[in-house]
C-alpha cells in the first residue's frame, strides 16, 4: 500500500554476509515496579484486525503481582465467564501458573471453547461486521486480486515453470483471500495451468467447511485421508487439500510453492519476559547451577498466567481506559515468575537481538518471543530454498507475509491485545470468546528464514500502503469505479452504482491509509524469495515485473 518509489529493502533484504544482522534499535523499556505496574501493549493495529483504532497502545490487562496468590484458596463455587476459563483455572490449580503461550494456544485453538476451533456459540462468525474484526480481504476484493497478481509476477520472474506450482495459505479465515487470488490467476492461463494443487492450513473444522463452500461450492463433497481433507476447486477443477499443520504438506524439490500468510503470525502464541536484578542473597540452596550467583545479576523472568482473585472487578484490577469494560472482569492476569522457567533460560538467549536488550535496556526491559513464528518461517524457507533435510538444487517459489508489527527491527513488547465485537478488551476476559493477537516480530521471521536455508533471501518489511500502491491498487479501484459508472449510464439503478463507487473508494483508501494507526502504516509486507544475491527485487518491494 505505498507509492511507486525506489525503496531500500529494510530488514534483511540482503543476506548481510549470510549471517550478519543489524542490531535493532530498542526503544526505552517500559518501567514497571515489581508489584503493581500495569503491563501495557505496544503499538496496536486497528481493530480491523483490527478495525477500530483508538490509542496506539493497548494494555495487557494485567498487573504484575507477587507469585504467592494462594491458588488453593480459590473457592470451588466461583463462576467463571466461560467453560474454557474454568478448564484453565482447574489446570492452573493442579500445575501452577502457565506460560502466556499456553494460555493463548488454549484460548485460540483449544477443543473446549477455543476461539477458532471450539466455538461455544452457534452460528458464531469471528469475521466481518457481525463478528469481532474485519480483515483486509473483506474490506475490498482488490486486496486479494493484487496478492494474486504478485504471485503471478513471481512466477514470471522465476522462469514460468509449467508444472509443479503449489498455492499454500496458512490461516485462511473464511477463504476470501484465496478465492480472490484464484479468480485473478484465472486471467493468466499459463500460470493457472501450472498449478498442481492448492493447500489450506486450517485447524478449525468450522472454518474448513466455510472455505470449502466458498472455494468448491456448497454441495461439493469433502473427503478425509491421512493427510487431511480433500475437495475440488470450482475455478480450476484442481484438488484443494486442507491440513491442520503445514508439516502435513509434503516437501518436494521439484515443486514451486507460493505461500501466503495474511494475519496469521499475529495469532501465534508468544512468551513474555521481564528483566530483573537478582541480588546475590536471593540465590537459594536448591536453585539450579545456572541461577546461582555470588553477586547481583540480571535475569529474565517469564510472565505467566494466574487467576485473578475471587470477586475481582474492573476497578480492583485497574482495567485501563484503552480497554472496554463491557466484558465481565478478567478471569486471569499476568504474574512474574519468581524463579527462571525453562523458557526464560533459553528463549531470551536464542538471538543476538534479544541479548542486546539485556545489555542496552537493563532492568525493567520487557520482551516477547514467538517460537512458532520461527518454526513457520523456517518451513517456508526450506520449501523455497531447500535445506539439509530437504535439498533443492534450484530454489523456487515465494512466501508473502502480511501482518502488523514493528518494521524497524524492534523486538515487540507488551503487545498482547484482546478484541471482542470490534472493541479492545482485556485479553484475559471471556477466554474463548475474545480474539487474541500480538505484534509480529518481522526481524525474527527474517532471521529464522535465512538461518533455515542458504537458498533464500528476505525483502522488507515495507508498509502495506507502499506495497499495495506499488501493486496498483488505485488503478484497479479506478477500473471498478469506471465499470460501475458505465453500467449506471446504460440503465437506471436507483443510485446503487453511486453507492458502489463510494464504497470502492472508501475501501481502498482504508487499506492504504498511512495516518496514525492507519492500516497502510501499521500493517507490513515481507517476502521470502529464492537467493539471487539481491540482484532482483520483487514487485512491491522496489522491483519491477520481469520475465514477461
Image (cartoon, helix red, strand yellow):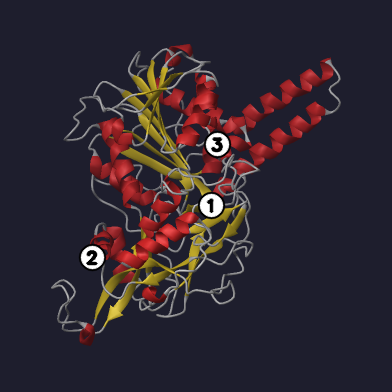
- Label at residue 468: 3
Residue at x 53% of width, y 25% of height:
213
Q: Residue at x 17, y 76 (%)?
A: 287
Image x and y of residue 6, in percent: 48, 39
Contact between labelled residues 3 and 1, with CB atoms less than 8 Å apart: no
Q: Furthest residue to the front? A: 77
Query: Measured from the top left, where is residue 490 in percent x and y?
Result: 83, 15
Q: Residue at x 60, y 65 (%)?
A: 322
Residue 135 placement: quadrant: top right
The mark closer to the camera, 1 or 3, is 1
Query: Which dot marks residue 152?
Result: none
Which sits earlier in the primary sequence, circle 3 or circle 2? 2
Q: Residues within 10 Å of mark 3 (few under 14, many from 20)?
A: many
Residue 345: mark: 2
Q: Is residue 135 left or right of residue 381?
A: right
- The residue at which mark 1 appears reads as 433
Q: Quadrant of residue 501?
A: top right
Q: Looking at the image, is mark 1 or mark 2 earlier in the sequence? A: 2
Q: Secondary structure at mark 2?
A: helix
Q: Secondary structure at mark 1?
A: loop
Q: In this rendering, which labeled residue sits more in front, label 3 or label 2?
A: 2
Residue 253 visible? The answer is yes
Q: CA distance from mark 1 to mark 2?
A: 33 Å
Task: Please report contact status of discs 3 and 2: CB closer than 8 Å, yes or no.
Answer: no
Point out the tag, 1 or 3, that comes first from the N-terminus: 1
Which is more toward the observer, 151 or 323? 323
Q: Give the left or right position of residue 263, taking residue 325 as reference.
A: left
Between the C-alphas of marks 1 and 3, the distance is 32 Å
Classify mark 2: residues with Cα within 10 Å, few (<14), some (14-19) or many (20+): some
Amino acid at each position: 500500500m505505498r507509492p511507486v518509489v525506489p525503496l531500500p529493502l529494510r530488514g534483511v533484504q540482503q543476506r548481510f554476509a549470510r549471517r550478519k544482522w543489524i542490531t535493532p534499535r530498542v526503544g526505552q523499556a517500559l518501567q514497571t515496579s515489581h508489584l503493581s505496574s500495569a503491563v501495557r501493549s505496544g503499538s496496536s493495529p486497528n481493530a480491523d484486525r483490527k478495525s477500530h483504532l483508538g490509542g496506539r497502545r493497548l494494555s495487557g490487562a494485567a498487573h504484575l503481582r507477587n507469585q504467592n496468590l494462594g491458588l488453593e484458596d480459590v473457592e470451588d463455587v466461583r463462576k467463571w465467564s466461560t467453560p474454557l476459563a474454568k478448564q484453565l483455572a482447574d489446570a492452573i490449580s493442579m500445575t501452577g501458573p502457565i506460560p502466556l503461550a499456553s494460555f493463548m494456544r488454549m484460548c485460540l485453538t483449544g477443543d473446549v471453547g477455543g476461539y477458532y476451533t471450539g466455538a461455544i456459540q452457534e452460528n458464531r462468525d469471528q469475521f466481518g461486521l457481525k463478528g469481532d474484526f474485519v480483515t483486509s480481504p473483506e474490506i475490498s476484493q482488490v486486496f486479494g486480486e493484487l496478492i494474486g497478481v504478485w504471485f503471478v509476477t513471481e512466477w514470471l520472474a522465476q522462469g514460468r515453470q509449467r508444472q509443479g506450482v503449489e498455492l499454500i495459505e496458512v490461516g485462511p479465515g473464511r477463504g476470501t483471500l484465496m478465492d480472490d487470488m484464484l479468480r485473478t490467476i484465472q486471467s493468466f492461463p499459463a500460470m493457472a495451468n501450472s498449478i498442481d494443487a492448492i493447500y489450506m492450513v486450517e485447524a478449525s473444522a468450522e472454518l474448513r467447511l466455510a472455505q470449502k463452500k466458498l472455494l468448491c461450492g456448497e454441495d461439493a463433497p469433502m473427503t478425509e485421508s491421512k493427510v487431511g481433507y480433500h475437495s475440488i476447486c470450482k475455478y480450476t477443477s484442481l484438488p484443494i487439500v486442507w491440513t491442520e499443520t503445514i508439516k502435513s504438506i509434503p516437501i518436494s524439490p521439484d515443486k514451486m510453492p507460493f505461500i501466503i500468510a495474511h494475519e496469521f503470525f499475529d495469532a501465534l502464541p508468544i512468551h513474555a519476559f521481564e528483566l530483573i536484578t537478582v541480588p546475590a542473597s536471593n540465590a537459594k540452596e536448591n536453585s539450579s547451577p545456572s541461577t546461582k550467583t555470588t553477586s547481583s545479576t540480571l535475569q529474565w523472568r517469564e510472565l505467566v498466567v494466574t487467576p485473578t482473585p475471587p470477586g475481582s472487578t474492573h476497578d480492583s484490577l485497574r482495567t485501563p481506559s484503552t480497554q472496554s469494560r463491557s466484558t465481565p472482569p478478567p478471569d486471569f492476569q499476568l504474574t512474574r515468575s519468581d524463579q527462571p522457567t525453562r523458557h526464560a533460560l533459553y528463549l531470551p538467549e536464542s538471538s543476538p537481538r534479544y541479548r542486546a536488550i539485556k545489555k542496552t535496556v537493563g532492568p525493567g526491559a520487557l520482551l516477547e518471543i514467538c517460537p512458532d513464528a520461527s518454526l513457520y518461517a523456517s518451513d517456508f524457507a526450506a520449501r523455497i530454498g531447500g535445506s539439509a533435510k530437504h535439498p533443492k538444487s534450484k530454489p523456487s517459489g515465494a512466501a508473502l507475509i502480511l501482518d502488523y508489527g514493528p518494521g524497524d527491527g524492534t523486538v515487540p513488547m507488551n503487545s498482547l491485545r484482546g478484541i471482542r465485537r470490534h472493541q479492545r478488551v482485556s485479553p484475559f476476559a471471556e477466554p474463548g470468546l475474545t480474539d487474541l493477537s500480538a505484534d509480529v516480530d518481522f526481524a525474527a521471521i527474517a532471521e529464522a528464514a535465512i538461518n533455515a536455508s542458504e537458498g533464500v533471501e528476505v525483502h522488507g518489511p515495507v508498509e502495506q500502503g507502499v506495497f499495495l500502491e506499488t501493486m496498483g491498487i488505485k488503478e484497479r479501484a479506478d477500473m471498478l469505479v469506471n465499470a460501475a459508472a458505465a453500467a449506471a449510464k446504460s440503465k437506471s439503478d436507483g443510485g446503487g452504482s453511486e453507492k458502489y463507487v463510494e464504497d470502492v473508494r472508501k475501501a481502498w483508501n482504508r487499506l492504504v491509509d498511512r495516518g496514525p494507526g492507519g492500516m497502510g502504516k501499521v500493517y507490513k509486507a515481507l517476502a521470502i524469495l529464492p537467493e539471487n544475491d539481491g540482484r532482483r527485487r520483487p514487485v512491491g518491494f522496489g522491483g519491477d515485473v520481469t520475465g514477461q
